[in-house]
Image (cartoon, rainbow, N blue to C red):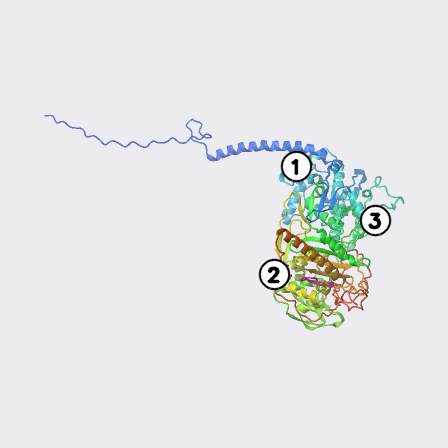
């Protein structure tokens, strides 16, 4: 029997999951079954495509730019720019926006290339672009050299732009556009211009369009401004006189002033180009002279002048050779179209520094300044009290909370004497400088109002600049001493012996540092005599006012982008069509220090040497009188405003022994009286405006805060006694006089101030100079 076998069914196998095909790389899979290309290769292909597109775009941009700049060339001609220029205006800080001045290039005189001295041309090339005749508009070697100098020094040392580039930049500056594209456009224009114009034409038109400061726009205007009187071509009113070479009145059309420039004159004008503000021969003669001598050195190296000409042009031992350098009273700037020429000329210089001459004089700008017409009128009225007496007065008023200049008196007649005493008049500050020692002492934490000192004749040892030991003698006038005096009492009495000891103990360099941090721009001496006002170079009313306003503003220094110097006083508030700069505030010292210092300076006004500065609200300040009564100051503040007043003779340091009703002019006399007269009117102006504002808003006026700490009382002290002068071997300091009340009849002889009068200096200081006070015999 056959066995039947039944087959066993195996279990069904689970089918494998479907496998998705790999993604197709559009750039790598060519469909032939080969592996895809590597990612790195794909990125390189993408980069190559983008690079090609970018190159095409760059070529299009360059082509378009070259086409555009080709159309700019005719517009760079001096005559065309002169005709197209639109005047700019300066406006006052009032509701109406009163026009103060018109800024135009009407004073610019266009010269041909054969009407400019070769010395001027070569001086400019020597300092600005020594490869001018070698490059084609853009100097790549010069750029590399400047870049290397900047990198190795860690700061900007050289500029790489050529004269052609500078000319183009100046010509296009009125557009106010400094974008990257605009800079590329300027370089392209310079390159293109070199193929259209000759080198001489570029250089000539450049010199016709450069701003040289003090209102001098163009080389001919600069020569007339700085050297016209020196060369005998202008009289004291700026009018042409007899040419010393021909004996006939000069014909500037036939022989321009710029044609007869000497090497020294040419070098100075070339020096000013880099920065008309920093190298201003009037405001910064030492910096200008140093830069001029550098230009002369370059001219000598490049064999433009001889060794003999070089030695004739520079001064000996680093001093300024004034035979080849314009004195302040010899500078005759073009007469501005202005209601306030001293202020607006100063502001114009700042505007050019910020925006460029082409834009300022031809760009149709509207710049709102900080000057307050009502306060300016009050200031002019206040200084009018001494009209006809003999000495002049200068003052500046600053708003504490903003650092803005609200009033400025720079002189009495701009046409007759354009030198601005307020901004350029460096005179000895006398005891007004003691405020900085006071602040430094309080800031140190070691001293306070009740700290006591010995008030007696002192011999203070110190080491002189030559390394030798010396002694600084500090005395009070007529040997009047307190024996023991608190810091508050010494401040009220302006005690020389106390402040000399305190200043040396704190360190004169530290006192100078405090002054600079508060807003003093001038480099201060650090010899012991500086503690009493004996400085190598004096201070200006502008910087003194600004520094005092830092104290009035509770130790805060306030400024903004358009400040007159780095975080300095503000004169340009805003520009129409542009956003207003943000205010910057820097705390120099704590409010507690400010409160203590203000309290003690309040005592100076209530019972001290400045009683004639008392006004209808709390005021604080300090008097200053030099030993020979040649300079007298009062610097003080109320809650909203600070003002410094200087009184003295402009041309030289001349003792004022009888000009105050037959008595000496000390800080507590005419300066304090002028200050009081002005500040009373300022208070009235402020109160009237507050009342009008309150009426408009339907509310009450706010109470006016005090300038000192709430609830604080003025420090008590005995009636002020006069401090005395020092007899240092260093330049002698200065001091105050106890003021006398106003009298219609000449008063009896005043008590002498802290420093007795000295004989007039044998050699008068130049206008606005900073000659140290004479040592008392």
Q: Bin the neighbour count of mark 1 within 10 Å (Cα to Cα): few under 14, some 14-19, many 20 and up.
A: many
Nearer the observer, 391 or 703:
703
Q: Choose mark 3 or mark 1, whichever is in front.
A: 3
Task: Give the secondary structure at mark 1.
Answer: helix
The mark tally for this picture is 3
Question: Sequence order check: which comes first, mark 1 or mark 2?
Answer: 1
Calculate the distance from the C-alpha at mark 2 to the C-alpha at mark 3.
50 Å
Q: Is residue 622 magenta?
A: yes
Q: Quadrant of the C terminus?
A: bottom right
Question: Sequence order check: which comes first, mark 2 or mark 3?
Answer: 3
Task: Give the secondary structure at mark 2.
Answer: helix
Could you say which quadrant of the image residue 396 lies in? bottom right
How far across and how far down the image is residue 767, in percent?
A: 79, 55
Disc 1 to disc 2: CB gap under 8 Å: no
Question: Sequence order check: which comes first, mark 3 or mark 1?
Answer: 1
Residue pointed to by mark 3: 237
Residue pointed to by mark 1: 185
Nearer the observer, 260 or 687:
687
638 relative to 495, above or below: above
User: Is residue 529 in view?
Assistant: no
The stretch of residues the image draws in magenta is: 615-625
How far across and how far down the image is residue 126, in percent?
A: 74, 44
Q: Residue 15: which disc?
A: none
670 relative to 239, above or below: below
Calculate the distance from the C-alpha at mark 1 to the C-alpha at mark 2.
51 Å
Q: Bin the neighbour count of mark 2 within 10 Å (Cα to Cα): few under 14, some 14-19, many 20 and up.
A: some
Q: Quadrant of the N terminus?
A: top left
Q: Is residue 5 magenta?
A: no
Q: Residue 591: which disc?
A: 2
Disc 2 to disc 3: CB gap under 8 Å: no
How far across and how far down the image is residue 291, in percent?
A: 73, 49
């Amino acid at each position: 029997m056959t066995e039947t076998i039944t087959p066993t069914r195996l279990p069904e196998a689970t089918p494998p999951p479907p496998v998705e095909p790999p993604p197709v790389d559009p750039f790598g899979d060519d469909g032939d079954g080969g592996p895809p290309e590597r990612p790195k290769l794909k990125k390189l292909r993408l980069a190559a495509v983008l690079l090609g597109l970018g190159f095409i775009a760059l070529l299009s941009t360059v082509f378009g730019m070259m086409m555009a700049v080709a159309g700019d060339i005719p517009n760079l001609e001096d005559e065309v720019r002169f005709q197209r220029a639109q005047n700019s205006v300066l406006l006052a800080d009032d509701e109406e926006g009163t026009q103060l001045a018109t800024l135009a290039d009407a004073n610019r005189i266009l010269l041909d290339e054969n009407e400019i001295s070769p010395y001027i041309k070569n001086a400019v090339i020597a300092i600005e672009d020594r490869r001018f005749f070698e490059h084609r508009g853009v100097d790549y070697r010069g750029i590399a050299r400047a870049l290397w100098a900047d990198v190795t020094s860690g700061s900007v040392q050289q500029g790489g732009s050529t004269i052609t580039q500078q000319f183009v930049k100046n010509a296009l500056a009125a557009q106010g556009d400094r974008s990257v594209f605009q800079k590329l456009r300027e370089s392209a224009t310079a390159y293109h211009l070199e193929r259209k114009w000759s080198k001489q034409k570029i250089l000539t038109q450049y010199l016709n369009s450069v701003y040289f400061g003090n209102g001098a726009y163009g080389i001919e205007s600069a020569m007339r401004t700085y050297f016209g009187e020196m060369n005998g071509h202008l009289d004291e009113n700026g009018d042409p006189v007899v040419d010393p070479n021909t004996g006939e009145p000069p014909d500037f059309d036939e022989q321009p002033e710029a044609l007869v420039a000497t090497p020294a004159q040419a070098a100075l004008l070339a020096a000013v180009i880099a920065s008309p503000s920093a190298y201003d021969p009037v405001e910064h003669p030492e910096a200008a002279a140093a830069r001029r001598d550098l230009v002369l050195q370059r001219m000598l190296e490049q064999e433009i002048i001889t060794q003999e000409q070089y030695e004739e042009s520079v001064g000996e031992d680093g001093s300024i050779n004034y035979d080849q350098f314009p004195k302040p009273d010899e500078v005759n700037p073009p007469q501005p179209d202005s209601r306030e020429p001293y202020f607006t000329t100063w502001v114009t210089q700042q505007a050019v520094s910020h925006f460029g001459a082409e834009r300022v004089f031809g760009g149709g700008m509207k710049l709102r300044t900080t000057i307050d017409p009502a306060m300016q009128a009050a200031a002019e009225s206040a200084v009018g009290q001494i009209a006809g007496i003999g000495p002049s007065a200068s003052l500046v008023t600053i708003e504490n909370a903003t650092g803005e200049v609200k009033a400025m008196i720079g002189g009495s007649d701009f046409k007759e004497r354009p030198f601005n005493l307020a901004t350029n008049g460096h005179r000895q500050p006398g005891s007004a400088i003691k405020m900085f020692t006071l602040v430094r002492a309080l800031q140190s934490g070691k001293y306070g109002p009740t700290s006591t000192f010995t008030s007696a004749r002192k011999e203070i040892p110190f080491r002189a600049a030559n390394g030798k030991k010396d002694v600084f003698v500090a005395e009070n006038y007529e040997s009047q001493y307190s024996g023991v005096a608190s810091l508050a009492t010494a401040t009220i009495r302006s005690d020389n012996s106390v402040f000399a000891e305190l200043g040396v103990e704190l360190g004169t360099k530290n006192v100078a540092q405090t002054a600079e941090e508060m807003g003093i721009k001038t480099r201060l001496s650090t010899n012991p005599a500086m503690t009493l006002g004996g400085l190598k170079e004096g201070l200006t009313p502008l910087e003194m006012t600004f520094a005092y306003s830092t104290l009035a503003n509770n130790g805060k220094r306030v400024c903004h982008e358009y400040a007159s110097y780095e975080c300095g006083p503000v004169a340009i508030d805003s520009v129409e069509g542009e956003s207003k700069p943000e205010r910057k505030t820097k705390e120099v010292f704590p409010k507690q220090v400010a409160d203590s210092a203000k309290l003690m300076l309040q005592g100076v006004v209530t019972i001290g040497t400045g009683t004639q500065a008392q006004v209808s609200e709390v005021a604080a300040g300090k008097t200053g009188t030099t030993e020979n009564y040649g300079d007298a100051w009062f610097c003080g503040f109320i809650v909203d405003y600070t003002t410094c007043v200087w009184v003295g003779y402009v041309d030289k340091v001349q003792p004022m022994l009888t000009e105050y009703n037959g008595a000496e002019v000390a800080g507590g006399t005419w300066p304090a009286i002028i200050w009081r007269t002005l500040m009373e009117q300022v208070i009235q102006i402020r109160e009237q405006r507050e009342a009008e504002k309150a009426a408009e808003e339907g509310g009450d006026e706010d109470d006016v805060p005090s300038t000192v700490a709430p609830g604080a009382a003025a420090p008590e002290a005995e009636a002020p006694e006069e401090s005395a002068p020092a007899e240092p071997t260093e330049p002698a300091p200065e001091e105050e006089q106890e003021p006398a009340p106003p009298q219609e009849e000449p008063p009896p002889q005043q008590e002498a101030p802290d420093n007795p009068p000295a004989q007039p200096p044998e050699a008068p200081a130049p206008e606005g100079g900073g000659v140290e006070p004479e040592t008392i015999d």
